[in-house]
Image (tube, helix red, strand yellow):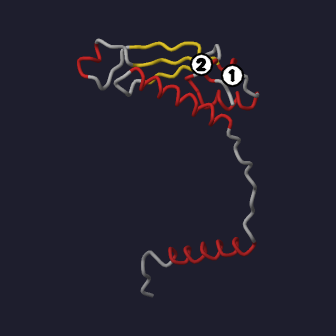
């Protein structure tokens, strides 16, 4: 298992918007978590998936920056940020299943063409009526 604790380089607490009433202006409850991806020692394909999953949350220096501000306490926001980081890394370790190409059978193609012909005849039957 990967040691996420060793890769976390910095936790900074910020003043957050959101729940907390007037207390929100006095207490820094939001947490900004920085994780150095290179210290995780990931395989190249896992690193590539993590980079694409992180998107703009990854800096040019190889740090993932997560901000959690939904809770009223530092501890809850800190736990949420760490859980989100762990989930992101776990998703990067999941390999996508290879897609198996399939082809429609001859009977399926014939059925589709017959349905199209029937629908075309229904539409051809619409329009002005000729009384000749």
Horizontal relation, residue 43 to residue 21: left or right: right
Mark 1 surroundings within 10 Å by alpha-carbon count, few (fewer than 14), some (14 through 19), many (20 or more):
some
Q: Which residue is mark 1?
A: 40
Horizontal relation, residue 45 to residue 12: left or right: right
Up/down of 132 relative to 113, above or below: below
For image coordinates 71% across by 31% down, the residue present is 46
Q: Which residue is mark 2?
A: 35
Q: Earlier in the sequence, mark 1 or mark 2?
A: 2
For image coordinates 75% across by 72% down, the residue present is 106
Nearer the observer, 13 or 107 = 13
**Image quarter of residue 128:** bottom left
Residue 98 location (% of width, % of height): 74, 48
Locate the N terminus and report the quarter of the image it occupies. top right
Contact (CB < 8 A) between labels 1 and 2? yes
Residue 11 location (% of width, % of height): 51, 14
For image coordinates 62% across by 37% down, the residue present is 91
The disc label shown at residue 130, or none: none
Q: Secondary structure at mark 2?
A: strand
**Image quarter of residue 59:** top right
Nearer the observer, 23 or 65 = 23
Nearer the observer, 74 or 106 = 74
Number of numbered discs overlaid on the protein picture: 2
Give the Cα distance between marks 1 and 2: 9 Å
Mark 2 surroundings within 10 Å by alpha-carbon count, few (fewer than 14), some (14 through 19), many (20 or more):
many
Nearer the observer, 116 or 66 = 66
For image coordinates 24% across by 22% down, the residue present is 21
Horizontal relation, residue 91 to residue 76: left or right: right
**Image quarter of residue 55:** top right
Q: Secondary structure at mark 1?
A: helix
Residue 50 location (% of width, % of height): 65, 29
């Amino acid at each position: 298992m990967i040691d996420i604790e060793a890769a976390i380089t910095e936790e900074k607490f910020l003043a957050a918007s959101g729940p907390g009433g007037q207390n929100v202006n006095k207490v820094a409850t939001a947490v900004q978590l920085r994780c150095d991806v290179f210290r995780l020692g990931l395989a190249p394909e896992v690193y590539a998936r993590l980079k694409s999953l992180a998107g703009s949350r990854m800096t040019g220096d190889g740090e993932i920056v997560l901000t959690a501000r939904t809770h009223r306490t530092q501890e809850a926001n800190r736990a949420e940020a760490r859980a989100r980081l762990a989930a992101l890394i776990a998703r990067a370790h999941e390999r996508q299943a290879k897609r198996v190409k399939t082809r429609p059978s001859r009977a399926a193609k014939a059925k589709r063409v017959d349905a199209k012909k029937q629908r075309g005849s229904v539409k051809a039957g619409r329009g002005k009526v000729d009384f000749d």
